[in-house]
Each structure stands twice: as structure tokens, then as C-alpha cells.
Amino acid sequence: MDNNTEKFDVCIIGASLAGNYLCYLISNLGLKIAVIEEHYDIGLPLQCAGIVSRKIKKLIEIPNSIILNKLKVAKLVSPSGKSILLSGDEEPLVIDRIGLDNHFYKQAERFSNVSYYLGERFKSFSYLKEQHQTKLWITTSKRKFTASMLIGCDGPLSSVAKSLKSKNKVIYASQIVIRGSFEEDQAVMYFNPDWKELFGWIVPEGNKRYRIGLASSENVFSKYKKFLGIIHIDFKSKISQQGGIIPYGLMKNVAFSNILLLGDAACQVKATTGGGIIMLLTAVKIAAIAIRKSFKANNFSKKYLKKNYEKPCKSLIGSQLKIHYLIRMLLERFSSKDYDTFFKILKTHHIEQKISFYGDMDFPNQLILQLLKSSLVIKFLLKFFLQNPILLPKILFIFLKR
Ligand SMILES: Cc1cc2nc3c(=O)[nH]c(=O)nc-3n(C[C@H](O)[C@H](O)[C@H](O)COP(=O)(O)OP(=O)(O)OC[C@H]3O[C@@H](n4cnc5c(N)ncnc54)[C@H](O)[C@@H]3O)c2cc1C
């Protein structure tokens, strides 16, 4: 390192939603911030269906221009075509995801202490001892510089996480946008043991345009074609096409010496829906406070960052993410017949309405408690656990592990 080496306080990798929102939140702290993004265009390529609960309005001020549609009903369809309808308080929004990423980018990049480096790839980091302080020596595809903190907001295949020997499992998604004539206020989810890690979806973005996708761990494109056949959509009728990767599993360690992981890089994603936006916005707020505290106390130790970031993250979203993962573990073992039986129980015993009322896309503990009040649900689950004896010890292990 020579005297000309550029010095930053914070280096954020990834200028998507997590990176841009974090940069915006800490941009007024007087810190020198570098944001490294491998693509030249913010928000592209699009990898999102853009459906979020209204909780987003409590987390951020969202411009009306970014809200494309408001939904009233979620329709869940079993492999044999039986369905249940969930409505109620949630009324999710369909958002312009490219617009949202750009919204925070535009607000953050006008600060003179913030430098965006687009079209540049993070490659590696190493620790650097400097006058009783540990800093980071960061290498990108175009430069080398130092920083006190590195924040990995670089998505499901995070290079920052990989450097820390933390790797996410992932599932793959395929999506097209078409013009069609489905319900305009209804999101539809198609469950099937063939794509057991998630579901196929139809999300109406308004003006008769629909986002139609599917995610699975393998052979996604052949499964996607099968799904399009089921819903009678011709792939060639697409207006646009997207692919994508969704992290799959539980949030792991997210704080290290001088380093935080955030968003998809930290697996802060609901295993039931693949949705990450609400979770990551919640985590970004915690990260911004932790970063401020670290610079104030001049303490970037793993212990301090775990206390101020990882612990609050685990208590606010970690336990909910575990519940989502538990539900997914159950659904993954459902046969086509199990779906029909379960939907029938929910429908004929008015539990459908309870889900509608208590249903919560992000924090499902209330919903689980309500479901467990039904003896029919308990009976179904008992039979199910007996058929899958390995499942209960697995669930207990996850819940007892800190
Ligand atoms: C098909 C699909 C549909 C989805 N639908 C929904 C939905 O409806 N609702 C919802 O809430 N969530 C949804 N999600 C999940 C949601 O999109 C993610 O949780 C969210 O985008 C995560 O944001 P992020 O900023 O953490 O990471 P990302 O959006 O993945 O951004 C990571 C950024 O880092 C950059 N980057 C990566 N590596 C490097 C590197 N080495 N150097 C520099 N830059 C790098 C990338 O270019 C990218 O800009 C969906 C995901 C997919 C794939």
C-alpha cells in the first residue's frame, strides 16, 4: 500500500436493493463510502416478481409511481386443480422493482462522500493491521483500496460470503411477462411435488400484464414448460423473459470482523415464498445502526458487530425465517394427495377464513398458532409426521440450534 492508495470508511458490494438502501441510510453519517456494482445499469437484469406485503409502507417511504398494482386475493392451487382463496388484511402490492432500486440509488449517489463504481467486480479482501487497527484491503476488477468495513450485499451467489466460507444453497427461477386475461387483483400459486422447493406463480402487474414464473432446485426450464402447459400459456407469447436465483435455507452467521452480510447474501429470504424484500429492508435498518455505532466506538470487532447486527437480526427476523423454513420442509414432503387433503380441511372447516384473517406473508407465527388450534390440522400433521419420521427430529434440531 502506498500513500496514493484510496481510503474508504465503508465499502458496499452490490448496488441492488440492499446495497442502495443501506448506502442511502448511512450517506449522511459523514463516512466515505464506495459502492461496487458489477453491472452498468442499476436494477438490471431484473430478477424479481415484485410482490410485497403492505408492511413495506411502514419500512420505507415508497413513491406511488413504484406501486403498479394492489392485490386482494391469493389463490393457492393443488396439483389436481383444487384451490383455496386467501384474502384479508394483507392486500399485497406489486411493485416496479427496477424503479425501487433506482429510487434509493438516485438518493444516495448525490452525496459527495458516496462513490458508485458501476461495471466493476469485487474480487477479494484481506485483513490489514494498521496502527493498532484492523482494516480491509479490497481488490476489485479495476482498483485496490482500503476500508474499515465491508458490507456484502452481493446477492445469492455472494463472493463476499464465499470468501468467508459461508455459502448459500440456491434454487433457480424462470419468469416471463405476458399480456393476458387472468384476474387483475389475484396472485395465483401453483403447488406441485415436481417443483416442491417453491411454486409456480401468476402475478398481475396491472394493465393486463402478468409475471408468470416458477422456481425449483433443478431442471427448472423443463418444469417451467410443463407449468406453462398446465395454465395454457404459450412461451412464445412473452413480452420479456427473466431468470433468477433465490437463496434457500436458514440465515447463518452474518457478522464477522469488519464485515457484514446483508439481504440475499445473508439468506434473509422467506423459504415459503422466496420473498426477500421485507426481510432485507428490516435487516438494512439494523445494519445502518450497527455501522453508526461501530464508527462512533471505533470498534469493528466480530463480537461488537454480532452484538449490534447479528443478534438483533436473529431476534427480529431470524426466528420468523425459521418458521418459514419449517413450513417449507413440511410442504416439500407433501404428495399431490396431501395437498388435496390439506386444502379440503382448510376449506370445509372454515380454517380458510382464519388464514385469511390471521394470514401474514412475512411474520407467520400468529397464523401457525391459529392453525394449531384446529384438531383437524393437528390430526393431519400427526399422520404426516408418522409417515415422515425423520422430519420431527430435524425440526427440533433447527429450533434448538441458536
Ligand atoms: C425470480 C424471482 C422472483 C422474486 N420475487 C420476489 C417477490 O415477489 N417478492 C420479494 O420480496 N422477493 C422476491 N424475490 C427475491 C428478491 O428479489 C431478493 O430477495 C432481492 O432482490 C435481494 O436483494 P439484494 O440486494 O440482497 O441482492 P440482489 O438483488 O441479488 O443484488 C445483488 C447485487 O450485487 C451485484 N453483485 C453480485 N456479485 C458482485 C460482485 N462480485 N461485484 C460487484 N457486484 C456484484 C449484482 O449485480 C446485484 O446488483 C425474487 C427473486 C427471484 C430470483
Image: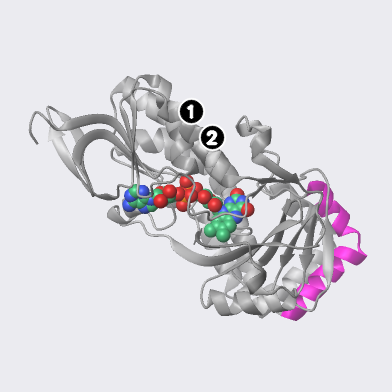
Q: Is mark 1 on a helix, strand or loop?
A: helix
**Relative to 156, residue 392 above or below:** below
Q: Name the residue under label 2.
A: 103
Q: What's the distance in space between the residues labelled 2 and 1, CA to CA?
A: 7 Å
Which residue is pictured at 41% across the width and 34% down the height?
307
Residue 314 coordinates in the image, percent (x, y): 50, 43
**Three-letter residue code for mark 2:** His
Q: Is 264 colored magenta in this rendering?
A: no
Which of the image's four quarters has the N terminus? Answer: top left
Q: What's drawn in magenta, residue-wise? A: 336-358
Residue 36 place in picture, x, y as percent? 33, 42
Residue 343 is left or right of residue 128, and the answer is: right
* Quarter of the figure with residue 257: top left
Which residue occupies the extreme left position in the image? 2
Checking the image for residue 107, the label placed there is 1
Residue 390 position, x and y percent, is: 57, 75
Please name the predominant secondary structure of the magenta segment in the image.
Answer: helix
